[in-house]
Amino acid sequence: MSGPLFNLLVSYLLLCSSFATAIRIPHTITNKHGIHSHQNIVKRSVTLDLPRNPDYAPNGPVAYALGKGDVNADTVTNDREYLSRVGFGTPLQWLNVDLDTGSSDVWVYSNDTLPEVAGNRTVFRIQDSSTAQKVANTTWIITYGNRAWGNVYNDTLSLATIPFSAPLESCISASPSLTADPFIDGIFGLAYGLPSQTTPLQPTVLSLLLPHLAAPLFTTDLRHHSSAGAYTFGYIDPARCKADSQIHYTPLVQGAQFWEFAYTGIHVEGQADWYLANFTAIADTGTTLLLLNRDMTELYYSSVPGAKQNWTVGGIWTFPCQLEEDHHPEESGSQEGWGGGEGRGGGELPDFEVGFENGFVARVPGRFMNYTVMPDDAGRCMGGLQEWDYEFGIFGDVFLKAVYAVFDVGGGRIGFAEKDLGDGE
């Protein structure tokens, strides 16, 4: 996946073709988290810091290819990672894993992993854990364009001060699209109601974690180019929101497996009108980009001079890294009840806004919408918003970095609040 752009395009096409089997959305599903109260369980809350990896080389086309293929794999090989230290086994072995709201399985590289797949990364040493018990006749396979697969164990997991027992999937082999990033040691799935990818079916880690939490929820505070972000489990941290901002909740769609919710429209800074309709999107910490349908994507880039699609790498939207001054000729208008801002000019990308039925408007600053420089042309940059050919959108890290997000499992809803974005507003 790090070779010539032609290979990236081929990989992109292969990943897209596997989407239907990878995401597996049934027509109906009953969400069951199995929340039980046990007298011997101590309910806790905890904060996990999110150190950013500043050393991983930017590669925008790869991030888009993975995003287009499957929502579960994007942060494995993107240029900006939010990894958390999670403990595995007894005594605890601490690994850097991606907390991923777009998948439900927890899998790690281990001494089961083929040497050519594991490389020089840190792996979980199963033989060193006194609590690891292999689950007989049980395997797992997850499709991320190609595959990751392996054995299943029951073992102790620890989110900071919260230990609990859960299935742990040990990787035997994985596709190059996953193994290309040497800094990540595994994936920790936190999807709302998606079943695990084990055969036979095992309980999800989220369902087993919930009884240990002081409240059945977790939050994300991802930060743009910063290590100041964190996940919190079992509580909401008001210090991470703006002082005058409340949390605005939206119910998940009926039968949701992912963190899928409705929104009512989008607005591009400098444009007079909102694009209004009934849409749904998935909040996915495991996807770097913001992925929307063609109409919305074209609407945004119509306000970016020189923006165009690069068809040598699957149609990625790019723009001149040095934008013209004052490219927002109009002040942005707004429909009643929505609000809006003035065009910035100054050679920046326009802000992007998302509206909700509850009245909340999430603003993604234009600087968040500039994802990275194209690897084949230092004069052109790749946008953080890209085209997505499915009915629902993917609100990945580009969006989530702009809000404080509450994943309320017990309430079957998601909440967003304003936070300080460091731009003086």
Image (cartoon, helix red, strand yellow):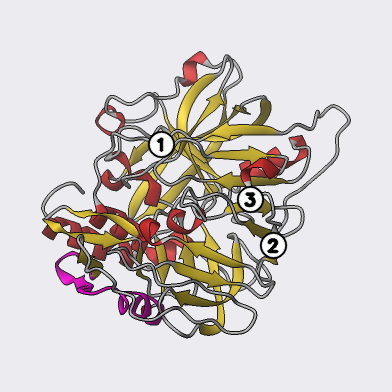
Residue range in magenta is 295-315
Q: Are marks 3 and 1 in contact (CB under 8 Å)?
A: no
Residue type beneath disc 1: Arg
Give coordinates of residue 413: x percent, y percent: 70, 61
Which mark is nearer the camera, 3 or 2?
Answer: 3
Mark 3 or mark 2: name the one nearer the start of the chain. Answer: 3
68 or 116, which lies in front?
Answer: 68
Q: Nearer the viewer, residue 385 or 407?
A: 385
Left or right relative to 190: residue 50: left
Q: Nearer the viewer, residue 232 or 16?
A: 232
Please say if 168 is above or below 33.
above
**Marks 3 & 2, CB-CB < 8 Å contact:** no
Q: Which residue corresponds to the image point at 32% horizontal and 47% vertical from the top-left?
A: 78
Is 211 left or right of 54, judged from the image as shown? Answer: right
Q: Which residue is mark 1?
A: 52
Distance between mark 3 and mark 1 Cα atoms: 23 Å
The amino acid marked with disc number 3 is Lys
C-alpha span from label 3 to label 2? 13 Å
Are dots 2 and 1 in contact, CB under 8 Å? no
- Residue 310, quarter of the rendered image: bottom left
Q: Residue at x 43, y 73 (%)?
A: 269
Residue with the mark numbered 2 = 248
At x 70%, y 57%, the residue is 247
Element marked by disc 2:
strand
Q: CA distance from mark 2 to mark 1?
A: 27 Å
Q: Is residue 31 left or right of residue 117?
A: right
Q: Quadrant of residue 22?
A: bottom left
Circle 3 sits on which residue? 242
Determine if the magenta segment contains residue 335: no
- For badge 2, the amino acid type reads His
